[in-house]
């Protein structure tokens, strides 16, 4: 079964996905549009690791298709955001290159 989301995508930043006490859920995600895909990038400072961590959530036609996690590898926020953008674009590009059978679906997230 594929999970269908019909709610406003900006509303999902409020604790739909738990990231623990070190992620700042008060910040709105950065929103990227890539044709019929929408990417929400969440980024926060991880105090114990003293690095940025985050995630990108990829939606196609309003349905969550992929979630990409970023370990705390970056000391600079812009570098962490760029890494999530690149990983998201790579996923979308790979998705477009592959043949999709009518019976193929994403797993439920």
Image (cartoon, rainbow, N blue to C red):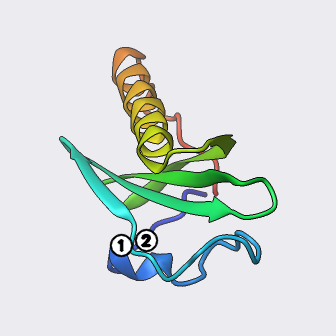
Q: CA distance from mark 1 to mark 2?
A: 9 Å
Residue at the farthest left position: 35
- Residue 17: percent from left, percent from top: 64, 72
Seen at 55% across and 78% down, the residue is 25
Seen at 35% across and 76% down, the residue is 10
User: Relative to residue 60, is residue 94 drawn left or right?
Assistant: right
Name the front one of labels 1 and 2.
1
Q: Residues within 10 Å of mark 2 (few under 14, many from 20)?
A: few
> Residue 48 or 94: which is nearer the viewer?
48
Find residue 9 and name its label. 1
Q: Is residue 5 above or below residue 8?
A: above
User: Relative to residue 31, is residue 25 drawn left or right?
Assistant: right
> Residue 105 or 59: which is nearer the viewer?
59
- Residue 62: percent from left, percent from top: 33, 62
Looking at the image, how many numbered discs can be counted on the residues? 2
Seen at 43% across and 37% down, the residue is 88
Q: Which residue is mark 2?
A: 5
Q: Secondary structure at mark 2?
A: loop
Seen at 46% across and 66% down, the residue is 4
Q: Are marks 1 and 2 in contact (CB under 8 Å)?
A: yes
- Residue 73: percent from left, percent from top: 67, 38
């Amino acid at each position: 079964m594929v999970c269908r989301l019909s709610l406003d995508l900006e509303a999902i930043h409020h604790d739909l996905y738990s990231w623990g006490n070190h992620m700042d859920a008060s910040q709105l995600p950065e929103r990227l549009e890539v044709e019929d895909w929408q990417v929400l990038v969440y980024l926060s400072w991880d105090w114990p690791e003293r690095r940025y961590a985050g995630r990108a959530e990829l939606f196609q036609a309003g349905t969550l298709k992929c979630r990409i996690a970023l370990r705390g590898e970056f000391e600079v926020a812009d570098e962490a955001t760029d890494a999530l953008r690149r990983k998201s674009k790579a996923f979308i590009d790979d998705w477009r290159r592959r043949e999709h059978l009518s019976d193929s679906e994403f797993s439920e997230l």
